[in-house]
Amino acid sequence: MALDVGTKTIGVAVSDPLGMFAQPVETIARTGRRADVGRVAELCDQYAPVRVVVGLPIGTDGSEMSSAKEARRMAKAVAGVVSGEVVLLDERFTTAQAERVLIAGGMRRKKRKKVIDQAAAVLILQQWLDGPFGGEVVEPEPPTGAGTEEGS
């Protein structure tokens, strides 16, 4: 499964059972991190992915863009509720590439706006499936109120 985390929506894609082809699933309208993560968890229950690949916005100069902070936060939160591995993967140019593909397919602007994040998630997942693999494995957030003393 792949997520393209935006400020207003999250695009979701999954692979076929053989792990060869990515396909769009849905666009989640963001309503708050808890609800967003809850919906991702429901989709993980439904599709049972081995891992969740979260796009990490990287600029042309190789540095993380301002939106990377939210992608990292979402990845950590998702890692806390899914059983599979969560990986951050460079998503450089995926939204622009997705838009070009949708325009080439003759899709009108209004429709593109509704599916652009799904299309970007498909590109992120296909990048992972085509390999070589990589990315940054994300550890879940520690439970709230967890002690920091040794032995707790």
Image (cartoon, rainbow, N blue to C red):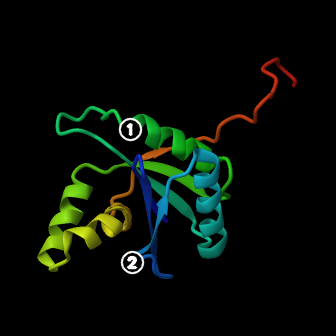
Q: Quadrant of the C terminus?
A: top right
Relative to 35, 136 lies left or right: left
The residue singled out by tag 2 in the image is: 20
Residue displayed at 57% across by 65% down: 50
Q: Name the quadrant containing residue 44.
A: bottom right
Tag 1 secondary structure: helix
Q: Quadrant of residue 38?
A: bottom right
How many callouts does the rendering have?
A: 2
For residue 108, the mark is none
The answer to whether 51 appears left or right of 34 in the picture is left
- The spot of residue 22 in percent (x, y) is 38, 74
- Closer-to-camera residue (101/128): 101
Q: Amino acid at mark 2?
A: Met
Q: Nearer the viewer, mark 1 or mark 2?
A: 1
Specify which label sits upstream in the sequence, 1 or 2: 2
Nearest the eye: 123 or 103:
103
**Mark 2 crowd level (few <14, some 14–19, many ≥20, 10 Å Cα):** few
Farthest residue to the front: give it: 110
SS type, badge 2: loop
Residue visible at 21% across and 52% down in the picture: 93
Q: Mark 2 and mark 1 in contact (Cβ < 8 Å)?
A: no
Query: Residue 68 bears which disc, if any?
Result: 1
Residue at the spot 29% in from the left edge and 64% down from the top edge: 113
Q: Residue at x 67, y 47 (%)?
A: 80
Residue 99 percent coordinates (x, y)? 20, 64
In this rendering, position of residue 145 left or right of residue 102:
right
Task: Name the outermost residue toward the left.
Answer: 104
